[in-house]
Amino acid sequence: MQRLFRTELIFLVVLFIGLFAIAARNVTDPDVWWHLKTGQYIAEHKNVPHTDLFSFTRIGQPWVAHEWLTELLLYQIQRIAGWGGLIVVFAVVVSAAFFLLYLRCGPASYIAGMATLYAAWATAPVWGVRPQVLSLLLTSLWLLILERSERHPKVLCWTLPLTLLWVNLHAGFAVGLALSALFLTGGWMERAFRSSSQQDVRHFRTSALILLLDLLLVPLNPNGPLLFSYPIETLRSTAMQKYIDEWASPNFHHAEYWPFLLLLLGSLAALGYSRHQVRLRDLLLLLVSLYAGLGSMRLVPLFVLIAVPLVSKRLGNWPKSSSQQKGPRAAALRLLNGTIMLAMVGFAGIHTTRLLQRQPQVEMEHFPARAVDSLQAHPPASPLFNSYNWGGYLIWRLYPSTPVFIDGRADLYEKQLLDEFADTYQFKGDWRRALQSWAIKTVMVPNDSALATGLRKSPGWTVIYEDAQCVVLTTADDPHGSELAPGILNRANPGQ
C-alpha cells in the first residue's frame, strides 16, 4: 500500500489522467462525418469503395479509401457506444501515445513527465476524433520499438503486424517506414565513423531485413500497391498545401504553434550545450523531422515525438530520489497523494460527462443541423452547392438523396475543382463558372460568407432559409424554391 501511494507514482497517475481529460473533446472535426458514412457503407455492403459515392462532381471517379479500417471502427463504435464512445476511445488513444513517449524520455520520472506534458501541449491542435490520431499512437509505438531494438533486435519483428494494421488504418504508415529507413541510414553513418562489432552488424542486417519485409506487406490492403505512391502524392499536392490549413507550413504568428517554436529553440540549446554527445542517427532524425514539421503543420507531431526525448534526457535528474519516509509524516503524505489522485479522477469524470452532454449542442453550433433537418424533408430538386467544411456533415445526414458538391476529401477533388470552388465561395473572378457548369440552383453556405453576401445582391437569387449560422438560397426559376419558401425552411428561429 505504501508503494501504491508514493509521490512519484501518484505524479504519473495524475499526469496521465489529466492528459486523458484534456484529450477528451467534443466531435467537431468536419471530416468525421464522411468517415462515419464510409464506415457504414463498408459495414452494410461488406466491401471497400474504390470510386466516389457521395458527390455529384466526382461520382464514379477513382477514390483511395486508405482509412477504411479506421472508418469501419469509427462507425461501429458510434453505433454501439454513441458519441461518448468515440470521445472516450480517442482520448485513451492520445493518452497511450504520450505514455509511450514518456517511456522514451529517460529514467528521471519528473523530468520525463513534464517533458511529456510539454509534448502534449505542442501537439494538442491535431487531437480529436480523427484517423490521424491513430497514426500518432502508432508512430509513438514505432519509435519505441526502434529504440529498444538496439539492445533486443528481435523486437523489430513487432513492426510486421503493426505495418499490416497501420496500412489499413491510415496512410500515415509511410511515417513508420521512413523512420525505419532513417534509423538504418543513421546506423550505417555511425558505423562509417567507428569500428563495428559483430552485434552492430547483426543489428544492421536484421533492421534491413525487417524493413524489406515491412515494405512487402504494404500491398496487403484493399487498394494494393497504390498505397506506395499515395502518401507521396499527398505530400506533393500543391492543392492540399494551398487550401488545407494542416498541410501548409506553420504560421508562428498564431499562438497555437508557439510550443513548436519553443521546442525547436530548446532542442538546439539542449543539444548545443549538453555534455552528452549527439548521435548521428538522432541528429538525422531531428533534422528530417524538423524539415517535415516546417513544411506542414500536419507533421509537427513527428518532430515533437523525436525532439522531446532528446531534450528530456539532457535535463538531468530532478528532484533526486530521497529516502523513504516513515511514521506519521509518511501516512499524511500517502493520504495527500490519494486525495489528489481521487480529485483528478473526479475532475476527469465530471469533465467527460459534461462533454457528452454538450455533444448535441456542439453539433448544432458547428454544423447546419436545423437546415439539414429541413432538407431531409424537402430535398432540393437541383444540385446543391455547399460549404467545404459542411460537405462531410451533409454526406452523413443526406446521403444518398442529396449528393454534395465538395467535402473534406481534397485528394479526390484535385486542384481544378478546388480552384473552381474557391472562386465561387469567395465570390471572386469567374465565380459563376461552378454554378453554371454544374447547373446549380441551390446554394447552402454560412450566412457570413462572401458568396452568401454576393448572391443576396444578385438578381434572381432568393433566400429560402436562414438562421444565425446558415443560409440557403435558390434561383427564381428553381421550382423547388417556391415550394420551400412558405414552409419550414422560411427563416428558422436561431433559438429553436
Image: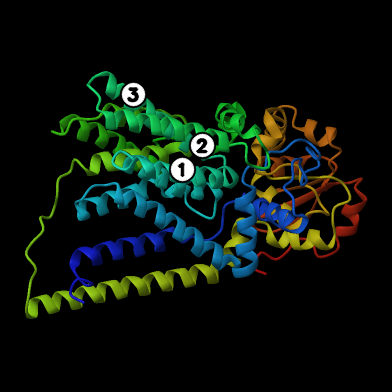
Mark identifier at residue 159: 1
- Characterize the local packing of mark 1: few (<14), some (14-19) or many (20 or more) Cα atoms within 10 angstroms: many
Image quadrant in which you'd find residue 183: top left
Query: Mark 3 sits on what residue?
Result: 188
On screen, residue 491 above or below 392:
below
Give the quadrant of residue 154: top left
Q: Which is more N-terminal, label 3 or label 2?
A: 3
- Residue at image point 81% right, 52% down: 402
- The Cα–Cα distance between marks 2 and 1, rounded to whole angstroms, is 7 Å
- Say which of 248 and 306 sits in front: 306
Residue 352 placement (x, y as % from top left): 46, 69
Q: Describe the element under mark 3 as helix, strand or loop.
A: helix
Q: Where is 231 relative to 120, above or below? A: above
Residue that carries the numbered disc 2 in the rendered image: 214
Q: Is residue 328 visible?
A: yes
**Considering the image in quadrants, where does the C terminus appear?**
bottom right
Label 3 is placed on what type of residue?
Trp
